[in-house]
Image (tube, rainbow, N blue to C red):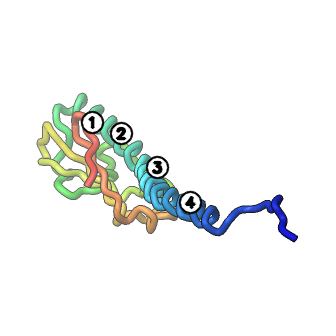
Amino acid sequence: MLRTNQRGFTLVELMIVVIIVGILAAVAIPMYQGATERAKASEAVAALGTIRGAMRVYYAEHGTYANGSFTDGADITNGSVLDVSDNDLMGRYFSSPCYTFDGAPDATTFTIECLGSASTAPNATEVATIVRSIDEDGDIGTS
């Protein structure tokens, strides 16, 4: 006796669904990873904005962005030049050793760089490849 009311999916239909799900996963996973990196880097960008604000205040008071103890590679919290403390820059992913000054001691321009690999924050291993920078104009750079 032959049945004509069989229900269910054929093997071909199931294979097509598996292929479609695989293609969607291949596209979605890299997009997700990029979004999580950008979200983690936003912590550094926010701190760079805070540092830029402190640099502008210092410039308004002194006519230069730094003093003699603020040379290339100096930590931002070096000598309390900017009144920015280690606690101000401590986050989940980035810490104060990440942020360094690049410019001359009598600078009218500057760049502050944040290296994720220099972080001592609790989740620093997750941002070791992230590098962000900001200049006196507020332009954010990535490397």
Calculate the distance from the C-alpha at mark 2 to the C-alpha at mark 3: 16 Å
Residue 38 in sight from this viewpoint:
yes
Residue 65 lies, with reference to residue 36, above or below; the image says: above
Q: Quadrant of residue 143?
A: bottom left
Q: CA distance from mark 3 to mark 1?
A: 19 Å
- Does the CB distance between marks 3 and 1 fall below 8 Å? no
Find residue 138 and name its label.
1
Quadrant of image for the N terminus: bottom right
Q: Which amino acid, mark 3?
A: Ala
Which of the numbered marks, if any, corresponds to residue 21?
4
Query: Label 2 amino acid?
Result: Gly
Residue 128 x, y percent position in the rendering: 38, 65
Q: CA distance from mark 4 to mark 2?
A: 41 Å
Labels 4 and 2 touching (C-beta < 8 A):
no
Q: Which mark is residue 29?
A: none
Pointer 4 or 1: first along the chain: 4
Mark 4 and mark 3: Cα distance apart in space = 26 Å
Label 3 vs 1, first from the N-terminus: 3
Q: Could you tell me which secondary element the residue under label 2 belongs to? A: helix
Q: Which residue is mark 2?
A: 49
* Disc with the residue nearer the chain's start (4 vs 2): 4
Q: Give the Cα distance between marks 1 and 2.
A: 8 Å
Pick whichever of labels 2 and 3 is earlier in the sequence: 3
Asked whether, in this view, residue 71 is left or right of residue 97, the answer is left
Look at the image and tell me whether residue 78 can be seen: no
Q: Are marks 2 and 3 in contact (CB under 8 Å)?
A: no
